[in-house]
Amino acid sequence: MRAPAGDTAPRGACYSLAAMSLPEIEIPCPDDWHLHLRDADMLGAVLADTAAAFARAIVMPNLKPPVTTAAMAVAYRERIRAALPTASAFEPLMTCYLTDNTDPGDLAAGARDGVFTAAKLYPAGATTNSDAGVTDVARLDPVLAAMSAAGLPLLVHGEVVDDTVDIFDREAVFIERVLEPLRRRHPGLRVVLEHVTTAEAVAYVRGADPARLAATITPHHLVINRNALFAGGIRPHVYCLPVAKRERHRLALVEAACSGDVHFFLGTDSAPHTVAAKENACGCAGIYNSVTALATYLAVFEAAGALGHFEAFACRNGPAFYGLPVNARRVRFGRGAAWQPPAQRATGAGPVQVFAPPLELCWQQVAG
Ligand code: DOR
Ligand code: ZN
């Protein structure tokens, strides 16, 4: 996380708050278990923001064209590594984009060779760059069986694509119509329901064996409800999918994240689009929050009186689910004067709006 400053500030700058004897916490370096890094002109700038804040990230495969094979994931991982700031130890964890034609053998080999950490199910048409996604989940059964056998987690964009279902109900309906039957067919499969947005999803995940079902929670869904989309006019920069829901759902997400429950962990779903693509008659879904994510989460945990559970959510529950070690490197966050994030991040593809949460950002990394 960077300091309050404009777009040209050095990344990863640290500020000493020790002299002020303000609250501090020291934890292992957090990971981001759901991230969009894009490619080419966009990649370098957004990767630097993530690498300044997180040790590892699960990298989403919804590029154009999507990352559908182990060879494509190896090539994408190389492009990410080549775009990292000098001396960064950031580790990208790669995922496979599932399609109607995914080869179970390639997926299993990718898992065995340490290329794939997980595979992602986008129902075709559910969200950004999901056109090549799965049209009929039942046809994915041989792939899911191979994943189950290989111990490769399935990451799910949990929304039905049926336009007769209200957009605010698509997550809850997905759980009932698609996810529960899928999990019954594959009881050994380990599943992450990504970016949960509803009280129904929280309850569903809580009721499952945490070794078999977990969920990520974004910073934006913890701090905005659906009113934010229409505050004084239409607000494209807070439009994402799944769309933010009613306040009671936001409160359920805050309770889940702040409980320390092992089912829930940090996943920003930071999803950069250029300002031009967002401020558009058909604006893209996605919120770019890598710059403000940790400060936003910390503000939410602090307001809930739950800073003691932040380490579980940000550093321990994710590695426990994925069977990975907790990061050895430790970082300290201090609470100081409110800081202003840059309004935009310049990228080679054009400027990207930085998510400005509707609260004061007082936490920042002070060491590590
Ligand atoms: O809002 C979103 N943006 N939701 C997604 O599922 C995809 C993401 C993106 O890639 O832009
Ligand atoms: Zn996403």
Image: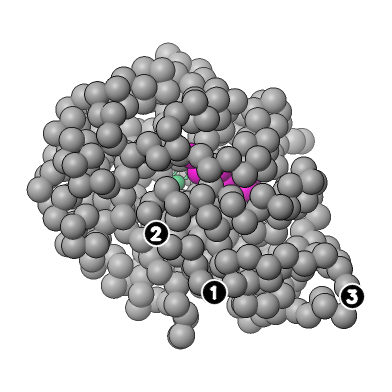
Image quadrant for the N terminus?
Answer: bottom right
Placement of 359 over or under 180, stated as above or below: below
The residue that mark 2 highlights is 324
The residue that mark 3 highlights is 20
Tell me the magenta residue range. 215-221
Q: Would residue 332 be visible to someone looking at this image? A: yes
Hey, what amino acid is under mark 2?
Answer: Leu
Q: Is residue 36 left or right of residue 70?
A: right
The residue that mark 1 highlights is 329
- Chain-order first, disc 1 or disc 2: 2
Count neighbours of disc 1 (C-alpha within 10 A) and say few if under 14, some if 14 to 19, many if 20 or more: few
Which label sits in the foreground, 1 or 3? 1
Hey, what amino acid is under mark 1?
Answer: Arg
Residue 271 coordinates in the image, percent (x, y): 49, 52
Residue farthest to the top? 164
Count neighbours of disc 3 (C-alpha within 10 A) and say few if under 14, some if 14 to 19, many if 20 or more: few
Name the residue located 65 percent from the left edge and 40 percent from the top edge.
259
Disc 2 from disc 3: Cα separation: 36 Å
Hey, what amino acid is under mark 3?
Answer: Met
Q: Is residue 93 magenta?
A: no
Q: Is residue 208 left or right of residue 336?
A: left
Residue 257 coordinates in the image, percent (x, y): 62, 42
Which label sits in the foreground, 2 or 3? 2
